[in-house]
């Protein structure tokens, strides 16, 4: 008996390192590295993922890159998406993926204009002769803008991730992330653009969502939980702690971004309450509520993007991994220093 | 009986492939968002017919429009080259530059410089389609039988008459070859330009439908639009083959049915 | 050799031709053709026979010497007609359109030319083939079309460059008979090039034997047989004599000149 005990103790001691062995995981983003990805890079840089037993590789997106098909194709394990419309589409088309966390409580998607051209009012934007919108937006929130806010397809011109045309023509408007493009425009165009956040006009989606395959949630839920927890802690550290390692990592992945741009972006993220506002303040970063998802869906149905019962909302997201106040205590520690 | 089988052979092969595809998808239980079965593509095509048809028509207009302009430009410039070797030496390199410039790179630039998206797409498709017609027609104009050229010299025919009565008919088979090549290229150019640069709202072609479907993970719709694209390419090819047959069958070896082939 | 009382239809006086490549194709060639005469240039390949024709046609200019060919006056254009070795028909045009070509280039419309084209086709025996295309015709028939085209402008001189060389013997014989018939009908001066001795004897009133490198006329032989000549002439002893004589003339080694 005692020998058996020693035997199993010995075995579990051997297995312990195995349990602690790093599980390789790939996480794909939807753009080139920028401050809006900061929390994830933080968790890699400061070893938070490693502490949770994860060896995470971040795979960047980009202007001509669409990482989304990689998730159901099992080439990546977790995916970052920009808004819930992608998730609605997935469920509608039977793609077996699900949202497990929402790192941004507010979508930073915005429309920008030159100052002094009469675009101070959001309502005036629809009269712009040209709006530079990228393909991704063309087929999602632009459709919402058309129905709900009266924008016209005649103004639509493709945005090929070159700010030149917008900077050169004062009467045009342009899409961007409220926490990124205004900074570049100030640098390249030497003026501060007018920024209209879509979220302030009814586009109430969560953003920077973490998606994974439904089978992963079913068969390996504690892997998902570890990834979500580590990511949340990464975001807390990035927003409130020492992010120099994360910054360095992002600049290595995307040489076009500078330290000043990252820092300015973080300031804007805090100012606009993108990451840590609303429910997140109590429930922790990544918080989601089904009620809000449902409300957003209803609005999209009204905008004609979906039919009333086309999407089974229960399959869109699962809140089992968030709303656990993860990182709240850490934040308090960091902010009361 | 043999001729019947021969003419049905392509259609039968196509149907067999489709059947294999359908069975393969069903048996391996491949999800529609990865590889849809032909039946699913068919129903999607019918369900989305209004929007796909409008886009199809737009793509056809751009393809044929660019092709017509390529013919015009190609033949005109080839004729000028044949009348003036000096001009040919001067400008032929520019034509070559046009041919090797990748549409993928210049399409976004075109859309920045040109206000109208339709014009930009036409231009991109034209750039791709123009060179084979020019090049083949130039070769054809030069490929005239030397003795016939001497005959025309004997009759002291003017350069214009030599062009219209001798070189142009001699060049016709070559021109038609260029046309067959350019037909497909024009379609590819139109689609590539629209795909790379993205099209603007009002009038959009099949490329935009494909992009839209891929962004919204509607894979069956993507395949439906692709099927229409492929059909367009095939129709263009068949059209020009028929044209070539009628124009050349009385005299050119390329349209003669070889008796030996028939018996095999 | 008798000069006819009338001035010759065509004449070459001591013409030489040196090509850009440096080759001396002809060296001081002189000949004259009278009205209605059938003269043959006989010689091996490369002796410059075609060059002589081309000089008369105006397709080449002599490096030395003079060439007198019938001039085109206002009414009569294309006083010189040429028949190539290949029938040189436009493959995309019907037989009618091929024969119409010289008239068309002179500015005559199709309706204006119809009668003359049909007459030309009838005289070569192809009146039923006006709408046929060259690819549908045999070699002999294509050559007839080529000849019809040459004759339609009523030329003063007919230049023929080995026109029957690519045909089989039967077609060649038939066309030889027919050619004499057409030529005698119209009394056209004809300069005929061949390397076939029998053909030269059958067709011509004079045979000019040529030597090569450089090209020059080494011998002239009159064939005194009267016209019209029947096929039976070919079986006669006179015929064989002429052929033998010409054969030995051809076999003689020519003194080496420049360009050898």
Image (cartoon, rainbow, N blue to C red):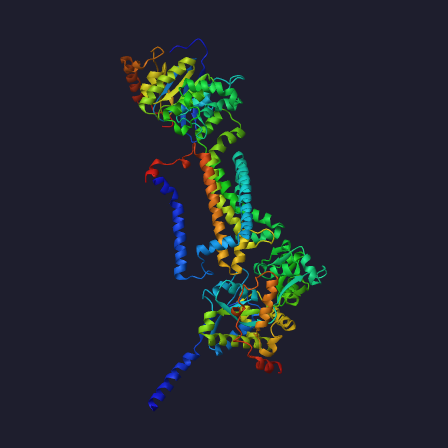
Which residue is drawn at the image coordinates 36% and 43% (left, top)? Answer: B5
**Quarter of the image holding residue A155?**
bottom right
Spot the residue most to the front. A309
* Residue that extends furthest to the bottom in the rendered view of this protein: A2
**Placement of C152 over or under B53, stated as above or below:** above
Q: In what quadrant of the picture does the C terminus of chain C appear?
A: top left
- For the N terminus of chain C, the quadrant is top left
Using the image as rendered, state which of residue A172 and residue A324 is in the foreground: A324
Can residue A35 be seen here? no
Is any atom of residue A195 visible in this view?
yes
Residue A258 is situated, as x and y percent measured from the top left of the image, at 59, 68
Q: How many marks?
A: 0
Residue B171 to residue B185: above or below: above
- Give residue C54's quadrant in the image: top left
Name the side, left or right, on which A41 lies relative to B115: left
Of A38 and A106, the residue lying toward us: A106
Q: Return the x and y of residue C207 as percentages of the image width and height.
A: 36, 17
The structure residue drawn at horizontal position 59% and vertical position 83%, both measured from the top left corner, is A333
Q: Residue at x 55, y 54 (%)?
A: B208
Residue B240 in the image: state x and y as whole percent: 47, 40
How far across and down, in percent of the image, does residue B187 sit? 51, 47
**In the displayed structure, does residue C34 sit left or right of residue C75?**
left
- Outermost residue on the top side: it is C5
């Amino acid at each position: 008996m005692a020998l058996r005990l020693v035997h199993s103790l010995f075995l579990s001691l051997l297995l312990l390192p195995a349990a602690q062995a790093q599980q390789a995981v790939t996480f794909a983003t939807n753009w080139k590295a920028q401050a809006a990805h900061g929390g994830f890079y933080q968790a890699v840089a400061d070893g938070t993922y490693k502490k949770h037993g994860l060896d995470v590789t971040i795979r960047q997106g980009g202007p001509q890159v669409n990482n989304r098909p990689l998730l159901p194709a099992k080439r990546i394990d977790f995916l970052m998406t920009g808004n819930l419309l992608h998730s609605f589409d997935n469920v509608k088309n039977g793609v077996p993926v699900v949202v497990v966390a929402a790192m941004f409580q507010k979508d930073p998607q915005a429309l920008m204009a030159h100052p002094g051209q009469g675009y101070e009012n959001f309502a005036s934007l629809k009269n712009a002769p040209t709006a530079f919108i990228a393909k991704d937006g063309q087929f999602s929130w632009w459709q919402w803008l058309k129905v709900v806010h009266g924008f016209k397809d005649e103004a639509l011109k493709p945005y090929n991730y070159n700010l030149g045309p917008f900077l050169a023509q004062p009467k045009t408007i342009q899409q961007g992330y409220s926490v990124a493009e205004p900074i570049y425009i100030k640098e390249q165009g030497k003026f501060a653009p007018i920024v209209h956040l879509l979220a302030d006009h009814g586009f109430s989606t969560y953003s920077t969502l973490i998606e994974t395959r439904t089978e992963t949630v079913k068969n390996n839920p504690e892997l998902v939980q570890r990834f979500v927890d580590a990511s949340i802690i990464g975001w807390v550290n990035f927003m409130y702690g020492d992010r120099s390692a994360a910054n360095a990592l992002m600049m290595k992945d995307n040489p076009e971004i500078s330290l000043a741009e990252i820092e300015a972006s973080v300031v804007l993220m805090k100012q606009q309450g993108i990451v840590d506002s609303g429910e997140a303040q109590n429930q922790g970063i990544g918080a989601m509520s089904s009620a809000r998802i449902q409300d957003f869906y209803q609005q999209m149905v009204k905008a004609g993007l979906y039919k009333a019962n086309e999407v089974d909302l229960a399959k869109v997201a699962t809140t089992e991994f968030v709303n656990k106040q993860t990182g709240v205590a850490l934040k308090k520690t960091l902010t009361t220093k | 009986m043999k001729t019947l089988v021969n003419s049905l052979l392509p259609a039968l092969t196509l149907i067999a492939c489709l059947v294999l595809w359908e069975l393969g998808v069903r048996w391996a239980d491949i999800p529609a968002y990865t590889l849809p079965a032909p039946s699913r593509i068919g129903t999607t095509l019918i369900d989305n017919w209004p929007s796909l048809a409008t886009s199809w028509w737009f793509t056809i207009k751009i393809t044929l429009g660019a092709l017509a302009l390529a013919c015009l430009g190609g033949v005109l410039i080839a004729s000028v080259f044949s009348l003036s070797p000096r001009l040919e030496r001067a400008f032929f390199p520019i034509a070559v530059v046009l041919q090797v410039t990748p549409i993928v790179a210049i399409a976004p630039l075109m859309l920045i410089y040109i206000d109208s998206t339709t014009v930009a797409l036409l231009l991109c498709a034209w750039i791709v389609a123009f060179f084979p017609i020019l090049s083949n027609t130039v070769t054809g104009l030069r490929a005239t039988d030397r003795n016939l050229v001497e005959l025309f010299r004997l009759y002291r025919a003017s350069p214009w008459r030599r062009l219209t009565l001798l070189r142009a008919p001699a060049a016709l088979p070559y021109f038609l070859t260029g046309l067959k090549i350019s037909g497909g290229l024009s379609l590819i150019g139109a689609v590539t330009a629209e795909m790379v640069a993205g099209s603007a709202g009002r009038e959009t072609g099949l490329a935009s439908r494909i992009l839209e479907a891929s962004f919204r993970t509607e894979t069956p719709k993507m395949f439906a639009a692709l099927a229409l694209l492929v059909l367009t390419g095939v129709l263009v090819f068949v059209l020009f083959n028929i044209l070539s047959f009628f124009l050349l069958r009385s005299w050119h070896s390329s349209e003669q049915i070889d008796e030996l082939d028939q018996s095999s | 050799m008798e000069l006819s009382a009338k001035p010759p239809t065509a004449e070459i006086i001591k013409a030489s031709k040196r090509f850009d490549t440096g080759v001396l194709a002809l060296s001081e060639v002189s000949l004259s053709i009278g009205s209605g005469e059938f003269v043959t240039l006989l010689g091996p390949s490369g002796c410059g026979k075609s060059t002589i024709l081309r000089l008369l046609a105006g397709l080449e200019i002599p490096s030395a010497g003079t060439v007198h060919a019938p001039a085109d006056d206002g009414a009569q254009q294309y006083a010189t007609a040429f028949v190539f070795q290949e029938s040189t028909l436009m493959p995309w045009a019907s037989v009618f359109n091929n024969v119409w070509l010289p008239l068309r280039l002179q500015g005559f419309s199709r309706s204006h030319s119809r009668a003359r084209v049909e007459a030309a086709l009838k005289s070569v025996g192809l009146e039923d083939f006006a709408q046929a295309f060259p690819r549908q015709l045999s070699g002999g028939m294509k050559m007839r079309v080529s000849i019809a085209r040459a004759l339609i402008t009523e030329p003063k001189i007919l230049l023929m460059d080995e026109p029957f060389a690519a045909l089989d013997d039967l077609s060649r014989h038939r066309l030889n008979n027919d050619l004499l018939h057409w030529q005698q009908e119209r009394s056209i001066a004809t300069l005929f090039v061949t390397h076939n001795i029998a053909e030269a004897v059958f067709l011509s009133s004079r045979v000019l034997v040529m030597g090569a490198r450089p090209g020059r006329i080494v011998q002239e032989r009159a064939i005194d047989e009267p016209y019209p000549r029947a096929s039976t002439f070919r079986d006669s002893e006179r015929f064989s004599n002429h052929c033998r004589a010409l054969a030995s003339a051809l076999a003689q080694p020519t003194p080496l000149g420049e360009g050898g």
